[in-house]
Amino acid sequence: MGARLAEVEGLNLLTLSDKVVNEGYINRRLAKDFGVHGHLVRTLIADLIRRARPDAIWALQQMLGHTDRTTQRVYRSDFDESRAVMAFEDLYGRLSD
């Protein structure tokens, strides 16, 4: 799996190449087809990654392309919180058995 990730690192997620479909294309399609903005979809994906795989903050940072430290800290704290909640649930489950 690591080799495949290295192979696609930095590529456009839709084309799996350096080529971009068309700037704004995804936002226009989401607005036309579903009446939602791309930011909402990215937020939902970020929340899903955070809740399902709090150890995978790197995936979210790659997807969003956030490079400024403030944004990284905000997402990192969200992921840390999810990781702590999952650890607590695991511990509680083991203690109650």
Image (tube, rainbow, N blue to C red):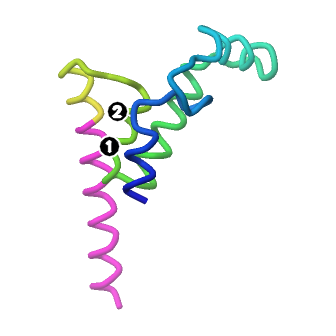
The residue where tag 2 is placed is: 61
Please give the name of the residue rendered at 24% of the width and 47% of the height, measured from the top-left corner.
80
Percent position (x, y) of residue 88? 27, 66
Left/right of residue 41 with respect to residue 95 in the rendered view = right
Residue 65 against residue 52 in the figure, above or below: above
Left/right of residue 14 with respect to residue 33 in the rendered view = left
Choose between 84 and 31: the one closer to the eye: 31
Q: Secondary structure at mark 2?
A: helix
- Locate the N terminus by quadrant: bottom left
The reply to whether the C-beta atoms of the residues labelled 2 and 1 are less than 8 Å apart is: yes
Left/right of residue 88 with respect to residue 14 in the rendered view = left
Q: Secondary structure at mark 1?
A: helix
Percent position (x, y) of residue 57? 32, 43
- Locate the C terminus by quadrant: bottom left
The residue where tag 1 is placed is: 57
Please give the name of the residue rendered at 64% of the width and 10% of the height, measured from the top-left corner.
22
Q: Which residues are magenta?
A: 76-97
Percent position (x, y) of residue 90? 32, 73
Residue 87 against residue 16 in the figure, above or below: below
Residue type, mark 2 in image: Gln
Q: Residues within 10 Å of mark 1 (few under 14, many from 20)?
A: some
Choose between 53 and 13: the one closer to the eye: 13
Residue type, mark 1 in image: Ile
Percent position (x, y) of residue 7? 43, 44
Q: Magenta stretch: residue 93 in it?
A: yes
Dividing the picture into quadrants, the one containing residue 23 is top right
